[in-house]
Image (cartoon, grey):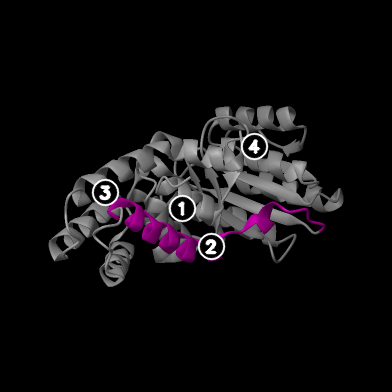
Amino acid sequence: MGIFEKFKLGLQKTASSFSSGLKEIIIKKEIDDKTLDEIEEFLIQSDVGVIASEEIKKIIAEKKIDPNKDKLEEINLILKNYIISLMSPLENSNFFSNKTDLNAVLVSGVNGVGKTTTIGKIGKILKNNGNKVIFSASDTFRAAAIEQLENWAKKIDVDIIKSSQGSDPASVAYKAVEEAIGKNFTHVLIDTAGRLQNKKNLMEEYKKIANVTKKIDPKAPHEVLLVLDATSGQNVINQVEEFNKIIPITGLIMTKLDGTAKGGILIALAKKYKLPIIALGLGEKEDDLQIFEAEKFANSFVNIN
């Protein structure tokens, strides 16, 4: 299956819901002020966000769509161009490229977003691109998380630093970075326990993990990724807001896009935070983490082949 087909299949629920909803609004209607208001309301309900929805409405109004043309096709083209213009600057395929210097990557997020699985999939892409990868099992809260990351390490044949359940997560991260420097690894992927952004003590522990890595390399962590669950809809906005206050986020990964019609939330995030989007989780298989490409996302979102 080609990359575009994976995007299309992974965003099928979003595209289907979006396309049918939009079609219902504009069918047999002129694009007058009332219709424009309905389109804006529909975009907001589709999690695209208030600001982006207002901007898209304004572009459609200024375009003055020819009533003799296919209105749905014309509006989809406007949406596609808007998404590409907004999100192309947020692509960061360089994240996965072959490196020579150390990259300590802190991976965070709330409970149940799929951090550990995502780390495994990131590790596979990095290794396939010629990088030397080591995992840090710093989610010491769950024994299952340590075991899960260990299974991924075996599966893709990379090293792992781990400790027992309940041990200090910052200590595990420190040892992993130390090992990476000593053995010339290019990437340390640091798993962390799922934590709600409103739990102050857990967020302080998260900050401690980052600070400990700085003792070995003042520039660490070199990347701070926040993993988000697309099925959470608008809740992800608050997650980005709060995690970004603790340690500045350098990239986003959106998982479970294949299981929801709420893919529009990625547009709202792009508009509000302008943070790099590293990859999208478009399924459960090993190869279903796809490097983010704005044009493929846009085409899949509006169902354009």
Q: Looking at the image, is mark 3 or mark 1 earlier in the sequence?
A: 3
Residue 208 in which image quadrant: bottom right
Furthest-bottom residue in view?
Answer: 62
Mark 3 crowd level (few <14, some 14–19, many ≥20, 10 Å Cα): some
Q: Which amino acid is tagged 2?
A: Ser
For residue 256, side relative to residue 99 (left or right): left
Q: Which residue is the site of mark 1?
A: 298
Q: Which amino acid is tagged 1?
A: Ala
Q: Which residue is the site of mark 4?
A: 120
Furthest-left residue in view?
Answer: 34
Q: Which mark is residue 88?
A: 2
Q: Which residue is the site of mark 3?
A: 22
Is residue 114 covered in magenta?
no
Q: Looking at the image, is mark 4 or mark 1 earlier in the sequence?
A: 4
- Tell me, yes or no, whether the two marked residues, 3 and 1, touch with CB atoms within 8 Å: no
- Label 3: state its secondary structure: helix
Q: Which amino acid is tagged 4?
A: Gly
Residue at (81, 49) in percent of width and height: 185
- Label 4: state its secondary structure: helix
Q: Looking at the image, is mark 4 or mark 3 earlier in the sequence?
A: 3
- The residue mark sitting in front, 4 or 3, is 3
For residue 222, side relative to residue 42 (left or right): right
- The residue mark sitting in front, 4 or 1, is 1
Residue 139 seen by the camera? no
Q: Which amino acid is tagged 3?
A: Leu
